[in-house]
Amino acid sequence: MIIDDHIHVHDWSYHDGQPEYEVEHVIGQLDACGIDMAIIEDSLAYVGFAQEHSNDETKKAVEAYPDRLIGFANIKPQLGPKACREEIERTIGGWAFRGIKLHPVVDQFPANDSDLVFPIVEMAMEFDVPIWFHTGHQPFATPTLVGDLASRFPDAKLIVGHMGHGLFYDAIMAARRHPSLFLEISQQGGHSFRVACKEVGAHRLIFGSDAPYANPAVIKRMVEGSSLPDDEKAMIMGGNIASLIGLSS
């Protein structure tokens, strides 16, 4: 099974005439690329909507295509542990979302903030779900900050989104040091992917596209066209994330 770990659906696209963000367009893109399922990492994190509204829209998309889409909860730690717990209980406990998305850049908090993020990590461990971190932008969203979290919570399931963008060497070094870290490879190229395969291993790399901001076919071709054995390609293209979220691949 091929699972894209990182797509976006936005309800505001219906009003602004941007069909590429609508769920039907995204499903069509997955079909065209031969992708079985995809995870919605957030809906409206970039435009200032409340986490409840964002997650309501994710729920609508998942309900429209329950065999194709998986919800991750958009959580805003700056609202405090009580509000975050209520939203995690609503989305993961109530709706069976399978993970949490944190965006330190949009929401302006350090990825390893003890007051804001530590409680979220503890909740994720309680609900046995991974946390997907947007990374790649200083000062709040660097792979080394997520690595610091991994050192403090070695049993947590932590995903370094975008493999750190341009900070991919930092992401690779963090993953080498902390065996619980996973690297999601959207927005990366052949060089960084090959280095990650060599230094970290296919068993901790996760396919994601960041669609519709990027074309899933590009990253998919990079993995499938690599010299990796087929079983390792299968890990990256779906097996690893399926295991993290408790989904049979």
Image: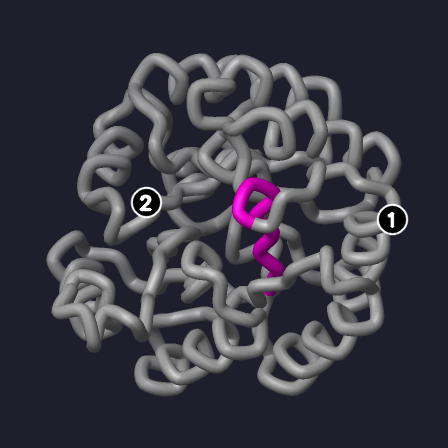
Residue where numbered disc 1 is placed: 115
Q: Nearer the viewer, residue 7 or 47?
A: 47
Classify residue 56 as left or right of residue 228: right
> Please, what is the three-letter code of the amino acid marked with disc 2?
Ser
Residue 203 seen in the figure = no
Residue 61 x %, y %: 36, 78
Residue bearing mark 2: 209
- Residue at horizontal 35 percent and vertical 56 percent from the top: 7
Q: In the image shown, does 44 or 172 lie closer to the viewer?
A: 44
Q: Position of residue 27 (x, y in %)?
A: 22, 68
User: Can you give x and y, in whole percent of width and height, for residue 99 in the image?
Assistant: 60, 62
> Residue 138 versus residue 126: which sits nearer the camera?
138
Where does the magenta region start and end? 99-106
Question: Given the image, on which type of amino acid does mark 1 rest?
Answer: Asp
Image position of 222 (left or right of 131): left
Q: Quadrant of residue 18?
A: bottom left
Distance CA(mark 2)–CA(mark 1): 31 Å
Helix, strand or loop at label 2? It is loop
Q: Determine whether the residue tagged by mark 1 lies in a helix, strand or loop.
A: loop
93 relative to 239, above or below: below
Give whichever of discs 2 and 1 has the lower sequence position: 1
